[in-house]
Structures are given as C-alpha cells and as structure tokens.
Amino acid sequence: MLSLMSEPTESRRERAARRAGEFPPAPEPLPRPVLDSHTHLDITVSEAGVPGGGSADDPVAVTIALATKVGVDRLVQVGVDVASSRWGADTADRHPAVLATVALHPNEAPRLTDLDEALREIESLAARDRVRGIGETGMDFFRTGDEGRAAQEASFRAHIAIAKRYGKALVIHDRDAHADVLRILDDEGSPDTVVLHCFSGDADFARECVRRGYLLSFAGTVTFGSATALREAAALTPVDQILVETDAPYLTPMPHRGRPNASYLIPLTVRSLAATTGTDLDELCAAISATGDRVFGPW
C-alpha cells in the first residue's frame, strides 16, 4: 500500500501505549444536561480502557453511566471507516443514550483499494434510523500528502451527497484545509445542517462559518493555554451555533491534557466555553442541549 502520510505513523499498539494512564477524576456536574456531540467509544475502550477503572461486561454502558452522573446524558458515536461506522450504528440500536454518524475519515479514503465499495457500505448504513449524521468526513492536509488529496476530495464530495440524499447532518473533519473545505461545500451545495467538528479555525474562519449557518463544535482544545485564537473564535460564535465534544479518547481538556478522555469530562470544556463567551453556565447548557436535538434529532 502506498504511504500517504507526511510524517511517521504510529502503530495501534504505540498509540495505545502513549495514551496509557488513568482517566482523570470526574468534574463537578453541570446544572443542566448536555450532549457529547462527537466521541469514539470503540477507540476509547480498546485503547484507553473503561473510565472509572477495572473492566466491565458492557464498557459502553459504564461510560454512559459515568457521563450521565455529571450531566452528559447523550452521546454521538462517530464512525471513521466501514467497521467503526457499522459498530456505531449497532451500538446506537442497543443504547438509547447513543446516536451514530457514519463515514470514511478523510485520512482513510486514500488508503482504500475500493473507495466506491466502501462508500456504498456507508450509504447503506446512512439509511438506518439511529444514524443521524454523515461524518466524520472532510479534508486533512496535515496527515495526508498531495498524492492522497484527490481521493480525499472525491470521498468528501460523495459524503456531502449522501448527507443531502438522507437529510442528515454533515460532520466535517477539517485540518489545515479551511479554504478547500469551503470551496467543496460551495461546489456541491451544503446540506441543511453542517457541523465543523473540533473547530480549529481562527476568528475570521469562524465568522465565515457562522455566516453560512454552520455549527461549530468545540473540543478540549479550547481549554489549552495556547488556544487564544480558538477562544476568540468561540467568543464570536452565537450560542445557538455552538456544540461541545470530547473527540475521545483524544484532546482531553485542561487540567488533564495528555490523559485519556471520555464523555464525562465534557463539563470542563463547557465551563471554559461559558467563561470565554461570557454566557451564564445554565443558559449555555440549555442552548447546547437544544442545538444537539436540532442537529441530530430526538434521541
């Protein structure tokens, strides 16, 4: 298989070792329930373990219960390839607190020997009732080199079409590709609902996304000391266009950066956003919750 990565890659075992360590303690509960709009339960359990320690017959149920205790009562499980998308759709069928999105990650698309067949699998999953979004799809110029970008773009365009055919939210992964993401959305025509997952742009990009009616989903990165530009973007985003996510097991919010992440840590990011935006915490929680229902539909 042709290597498409612009930097050395880690094996699954190496990634697991890097993230090894105890989950942080649970934060203070939120005054109103919110959702985690983007998590990877499968990767969290397989690489980081079960939040709270120990093992469980149903680690997903344990993860949901821990999150619920701190006011995170709904989760969106996000697919990155055919297998994880199918797992997410099945998990959403089993757990009322979970909805799913399905897609080929932009870094996955160039690696596939039969992209069209994988897209057909994604489309078949998109028809399922508890699959409420198409993603994460998009463009990633950080990890995929020039030789893989044509496949990335073809995959992104196909996912946009699937989202529009099924009337489901488009969940976008955008890394170092802001202008191209907007260009492709303009070419294809945006679906009714577009979410910029783990929003990473500055204030100017945020203004453009807000103008277009897109939703900006902020992860634990907004709490990092170096994320001044990201906080400026959050500060100008209307509260009814804000979502919050973990992207677990990645991007653990401060003060626990570097340790495993899970949905129960969402309150740390929400409180940071409340301070950044100057919004009352109760009001922000209510807005995030309402936006989650508007984007993904009732759980």
Image: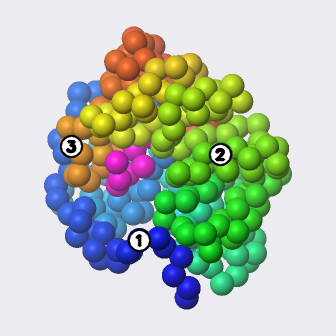
Residue at x 33%, y 62% (from the top left corner):
45
Amino acid marked by disc 2:
Ala
Magenta-colored span: 245-251
Magenta span contains residue 72: no
Q: Nearer the viewer, mark 3 or mark 2?
A: 2
Report crowding for label 2: few under 14, some 14 to 19, many 20 or more residues within 10 A (C-alpha): few
The residue beneath circle 1 is 7
Image coords of residue 10 (percent x, y): 35, 74
Q: How is the protein colored in the picture?
A: rainbow
The residue beneath circle 2 is 179
Amino acid marked by disc 1:
Glu
**Given contact means CB atoms under 8 Å apart, are the residues at marks 3 and 2 in contact?**
no
Image coords of residue 35 (percent x, y): 46, 35
Label the magenta part by its dominant secondary structure: loop
N-terminal-most mark, 1 or 2: 1
Q: Which quadrant of the structure image shows residue 83?
A: bottom right
- Front residue of 121/116: it is 116
Amino acid marked by disc 3:
His
Q: Is residue 22 above or below residue 145?
A: above
N-terminal-most mark, 3 or 1: 1
